[in-house]
Amino acid sequence: MIIELFTEKDYTEIICVWEKSVRASHHFLSESDIDEIRSKMPSHYLPNVILFVVRDKDNVIAGFIGLSDDMIEMLFIAPEYQGSGIGTLFVKFALGKGIDKVDVNEQNVRAFEFYRKHGFNVIARDALDSMGRPFPILHLKHDERKPL
């Protein structure tokens, strides 16, 4: 698997991966929440991060990561590729760039456990998400003493 920088032509495919992943893992979001976030992906979220993708053997995007400063801002893997090692590859990639923080929805237990398994610990908690909704956010930081 090769990590490559995305191109703007990938926006539609990235948003499709995002939506499939969210529908498989973010059961606490309503349909209107998903619609609202999806509508902001191309104008508010994706342009504010450096995006990298992994493609499958058919050149289809299997997952992506968005990075900024010292944060993993987004990491989404298409459901059919979850558990295949792409998420771990992305975390190692981010850590190799000195990026050691990530925020996770508290209700997304699977994502939280994924990051805990990879050496991240909770350093803070917010009761509301960045849009003021009642979806608590856990702020995680990688413990450098815990190798992947």
Image (cartoon, rainbow, N blue to C red):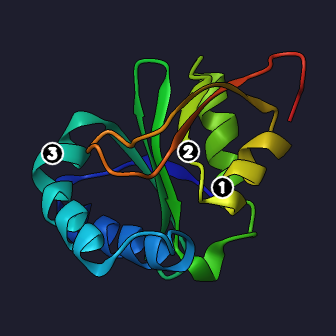
For disc 1, the neighbor class at 10 Å (few under 14, some 14 to 19, many from 20) is some
Quick one: SS at disc 1?
Answer: helix
The quarter of the rendered structure image containing the C terminus is: top right
Task: Name the kind of residue labelled 1 in the image.
Answer: Ala
**Which of the 4 image quarters holds residue 35?**
bottom left
Question: Which disc number belongs to residue 104?
Answer: 2
Task: Name the kind of residue labelled 3 in the image.
Answer: His
Q: Earlier in the sequence, mark 3 or mark 2?
A: 3
Quick one: SS at disc 3?
Answer: helix
Q: Which residue is mark 1?
A: 111
Question: Which disc number belongs to residue 44?
Answer: 3
Q: Position of residue 42 (x, y in %)?
A: 15, 56
Task: Estimate the spatial distance between the alpha carbons at disc 3 and disc 2, rounded to whole Å.
Answer: 19 Å
Q: Position of residue 31 (x, y in %)?
A: 29, 80
Q: Does 38 sit above or below residue 45?
A: below
Q: Residue at x 41, y 18 (%)?
A: 69
